[in-house]
Image (spheres, rainbow, N blue to C red):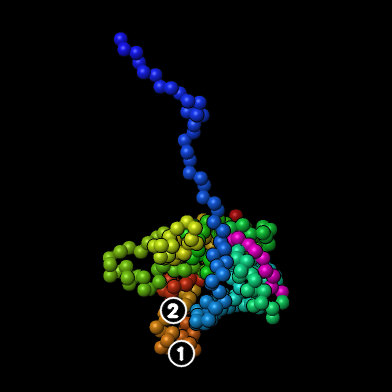
Amino acid sequence: MPKTARRTIKSSDKTAKPKTAKPKPKRRADQYNDPTHNYLHYWDTRQYENQAEHMAIRRLLRGKHFRRAVDVGGGYGRLSILLKEYADEVTLAEPSQQQLDLAADFLKGYPGIKRRLVQADDMPFKDGAIDLLVMVRVMHHLPDPARELREVRRVLADDGCAIIEVANYLHIRNRLKHLVRYERMPVKPVDIRSPENRRYDEIPFVNHNPYTVTRQLEHAGLRVEATLSVSNLRSVRLKRLVPQEMMIGAERFLQRPLASIYFGPSIFFLVRKIKN
């Protein structure tokens, strides 16, 4: 009978292990560290949106005052100066050092506002230490906000409240677009980056379904108490044709009535902790 060919076993074969993909490094939320992008100048042509957001926060906080407030992801402090009217102490908790450097100049005339380099999913505050937390224009960078929402609940005082803004995919123009195409509105976040920027090393930019977000909030132990539809008239063309004062006047009338149908591109939620 012919001899059976034997395979020579190398020592490397005995110890070889299947290759596993290296875990992706944790992505840090420092998207505004780009030296070519000045977030302060970004708002030069967005005064309507800025005033609409100030209006929404004032409505949600009317008659309230807090000991300690935190502006999570607040950039250079655009909204921190407003929060100072409602809290004894305000902290701008921002992940971008570039933004904090801009804030050093922007906040010079506003004593009592601290600046800290902070990631929203790992905030350096004790449990229940924050009476008011505001997180505006942050959720659009969070395809899965579960960790950040759990952190919001953890640091929030039992009788405190949070204002969380959501970039709304269900706004009226998208609804009409999906309607004519006979398409259902998506439940999951929608990536609105250009195809060439849809890479892991590029910061996410998503729009959310507010119904999904309310469930995510509840899962994190947060209950929605009030809702506003904000920047309802956001349109480059409209801003060219209509005086800003008229747009703000209309915005003041529309924020509450349109909230129930999530009409505008930005939804503001006032939330509190669900007590165990």
Q: Quadrant of residue 240?
A: bottom left
The residue at 44%/68% (across/down) is: 168
Amino acid under label 1?
Pro
Instruction: Say the numbered circle drawn on residue 201.
Output: none
117 in the magenta segment: yes
Q: What are the residue bounds of the magenta stretch?
A: 112-120
What is the x, y in percent for residue 221?
56, 57
Vertical side of 110 occupied by 245: above or below: below
Q: Is residue 56 above or below residue 188?
A: below
Residue 4 lies in the magenta stretch: no
Choose top left, top right, bottom left or bottom right for residue 206: bottom left
**Residue corresponding to mark 2:** 234
Q: Can residue 46 be seen in the rendering of this structure?
A: yes
Q: Which residue is mark 1?
A: 243
Judge whether residue 215 can be spotted in this image.
no
Q: Position of residue 16 (x, y in %)?
A: 49, 31
